Image (cartoon, grey):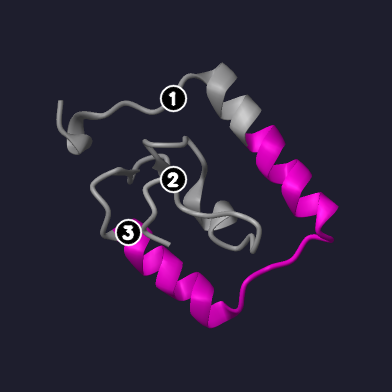
């Protein structure tokens, strides 16, 4: 199966991933990246074959990219940013 046919993680995995991300984000004091870094991240996500454009979420991790992309504590699971 190639990346474009990959399905999003299920609700349990997505919930666990979200919980871990929010914990890291809160623990560090809710740091956000600069607008420039955010725009670079979104450019990469928007050109990625793993972006589900309907839900604006990543098929690799299940996160909504516009939120995850702002968090300084987070990174792309595919090592694109």
Q: Which residue is mark 1?
A: 9
Query: Counting other residues with Cα less than 10 Å from the Cα at mark 3, is it few (<14), some (14-19), or many (20 or more)?
Result: some
Q: Secondary structure at mark 2?
A: loop
Left or right: where does residue 9 sit relative to residue 43? right
At a point 55% along the width and 22% down the height, the residue shown is 13
Residue 15, by quadrant, is top right
Q: Which residue is mark 3?
A: 46
Name the residue nearer the viewer: 81 or 9. 81
Name the residue nearer the viewer: 64 or 27. 27
N-term-proximal mark, 2 vs 1: 1
Instruction: Say if mark 2 contacts mark 1, CB within 8 Å.
Output: no
Task: Assess whether residue 27 is covered by the magenta stretch.
Answer: yes
Left or right: where does residue 65 sit relative to residue 17? left
N-term-proximal mark, 1 vs 3: 1
Instruction: Say if mark 2 contacts mark 3, CB within 8 Å.
Output: no
User: Which label lies toward us, 1 or 3?
Assistant: 1
Task: Name the residue furthest bottom.
Answer: 36
The alpha-carbon separation of the residues under discs 1 and 3 comes to 19 Å
Query: Counting other residues with Cα less than 10 Å from the Cα at mark 2, is it few (<14), some (14-19), or many (20 or more)?
Result: few
Residue 30 versus residue 64 in the image, above or below: below
| Residue 81 pos. (x, y %) | 43, 62
Q: Which residues are magenta?
A: 18-46
């Amino acid at each position: 199966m190639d990346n474009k046919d990959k399905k999003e993680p299920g609700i349990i995995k997505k919930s666990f991933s979200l919980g871990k991300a929010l914990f890291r984000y809160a623990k560090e004091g809710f740091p956000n990246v600069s607008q420039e870094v955010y725009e670079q991240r979104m450019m990469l996500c928007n050109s990625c074959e793993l972006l589900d454009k309907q839900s604006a979420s990543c098929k690799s991790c299940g996160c909504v990219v516009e939120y995850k992309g702002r968090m300084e504590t987070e990174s792309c699971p595919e090592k694109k940013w």
